[in-house]
Image (cartoon, helix red, strand yellow):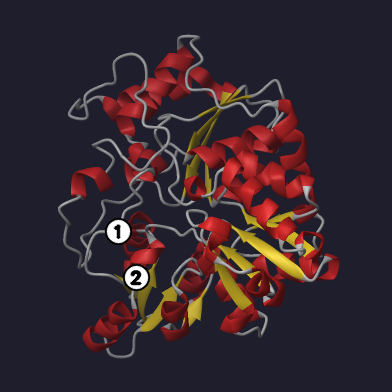
Amino acid sequence: MRDVTTAQPLDVQPTPLALLLLGREADPRSERGVECPGDLPSPSDPDLVERARVAKEKLGDKVFVLGHHYQRDEVIQFADVTGDSFKLARDAAARPEAEYIVFCGVHFMAESADILTTDAQAVVLPDLAAGCSMADMATAEQVAECWDVLTEAGVADQVVPVSYMNSSADIKAFTGKHGGTICTSSNAKRALEWAFEQGEKILFLPDQHLGRNTAVRDMGMTLEDCVLYNPHKPNGGLTAEQLRDAKMILWRGHCSVHGRFSVESVEDVRARMPGVNVLVHPECRHEVVAAADYVGSTEYIIKALEAAPPGSKWAIGTELNLVRRLANRFAAEDKEIAFLDKTVCFCSTMNRIDLPHLVWTLESLADGKLVNRIEVDPETEKYAKLALERMLALP
């Protein structure tokens, strides 16, 4: 267990959706809007931290707690390891002696952990309502219909699916069945290069921005090489000719957090902080990425700030919990770290994992009650794992 310093305020203002963004209300956009069974501890309970500590200590090596970078500090303090989604899933797989894997993240992350861990391990998500709006933007039925459209256009045999890690197990399984691979924001370029060795076109799921930014910024393609498939329109809103001409068929999905950042945000922070370095995640819009100084994954962002010289100024375009934590961490090194936007930008579903949910989970497990287990069915797991293994085999 690690101590976490008291968070310092950043220059951001709450929006009218603050309670939702902090996970205290239901998220109408989540497909898993369910409550935990049983009584949750009150958020005002002064003994929550001690209760979590006692329950975790009682469980000992039987439990392994994973904390995604976007989690609240109150949760991160109990994480055995922190990281991005794929790193955490691999960390879980490397701890076969842990009977319970408590994943403080969102649903697709827990699914990935279940795919990579043994059958003897139980992956637990403290709140089943912690979904991912991006992952939910591509359902198995929609993607199957898309493949029918590609088949009718006569291009399906030229298309290799590449799915972002931020996708459901069903989408990963579809990708595995159709000869594709998974990618992270760190290895997206390598994944696309591999896919173009297998076929002439790529169907990129579900984040259009990561696909477009990787193709255009990192691989030298043009915006005209990319078309946007909208699952809510007949034939995706595309003609057969457009599909035949395209190199990148981008799914119309996005991250609700990173999609908020704008060119105006970049211009505003440059005016407020002369000499600032703007560093954004590749899930941001293409025009924001083009206006930034640096672009990279969550791990890239952390390493860039670790290597930054004292006295440097940074504006970060990613989730606020992480930015706030980094601002506190590097304040002693005289590194000025600001949030790129002036309004709150928490991940609403990630923030559903709060201390009351974690306490309820740990105490339930300590009492011998397995709660909120995430299980991927064997058939889906088989093909999803195949897609993940192709990613792991990338040079």
- Callout 2 secondary element: loop
Instruction: Determine whether 289 is above or below 70 in the image.
Output: below
Give the tally of numbered discs: 2
Q: Nearer the viewer, residue 152 or 137?
A: 152
Give the mark nearest the N terminus, 1 or 2: 2
Q: Residue at x 77, y 63 (%)?
A: 154
Q: Residue at x 61, y 52 (%)?
A: 165
- 45 relative position to 295: left or right: left
Kind of residue sitting beneath label 2: Phe
* Residue 65 image offset from top left, x and y in percent: 51, 34
* Residue 43 image offset from top left, x and y in percent: 22, 30
Q: Residue furthest top?
A: 368
Q: Which residue is mark 2?
A: 261
Q: Are marks 1 and 2 in contact (CB under 8 Å)?
A: yes
Q: Which residue is mark 1?
A: 345
**Is residue 304 at least partly visible in the picture?**
yes
Report which quarter residue 329 is drawn in: bottom left
Q: Residue at x 20, y 44 (%)?
A: 19
